[in-house]
Amino acid sequence: METERIAGEDQDMDGEFDSVREVLRDRFRLSSISIAHAQARRSGLEISEPVVACLADLGFQFSEQLAKDLERFARHAGRKSVNTEDVILSGEPSFLSNRPVLLLCTFY
């Protein structure tokens, strides 16, 4: 009985996480699209919708991975929260060279 209740709570939390993730993804995507179009106008260029969508999706994927990496750095250091050192470490060239999403972005 207790196990069933806990399993149900886990499913509720997973559903809530997915819902929050979707909202964040949509907001990130809208912001990215707006920035891409503004930058294109400022530069006097045109940018196709598939390219804008791809950039927005890659940016969100990179941000998700970065958040996971920062969490791992903090845990490895025995902390429960991320600090500036974790962010600096994530920007190290040796760390970034192992990021396929970042490498994909450099080709666009």
Image: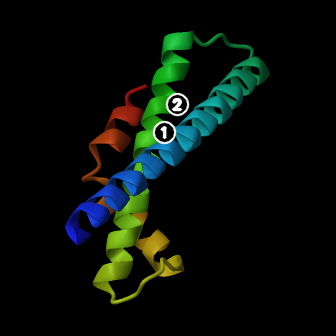
The colour style of the image is: rainbow
Q: Are marks 2 and 1 in contact (CB under 8 Å)?
A: yes
The reply to whether residue 2 is visible in this rendering is yes
Q: Residue at x 64, y 26 (%)?
A: 33
Q: Which of the two residues, 89 or 45, is positioned nearer the viewer here?
A: 89
Where 42 falls versus 19 (above or below)? Answer: above
Q: Residue at x 40, y 41 (%)?
A: 61
The reply to whether residue 92 is visible in this rendering is no
Q: Residue type at mark 2: give it.
A: Ala
Q: Helix, strand, or loop for circle 1?
A: helix
Q: Which residue is mark 1?
A: 59
Residue 4 occupies quadrant: bottom left
Q: Which of the two residues, 76 or 103, is positioned nearer the viewer here?
A: 76
Binning the other alpha carbons within 10 Å of mark 1 as few (below 14), some (14 to 19) or many (20 upward) gives some
Q: Residue type at mark 1: give it.
A: Gly
Question: Residue 15, how many percent across, how many down?
Answer: 42, 46
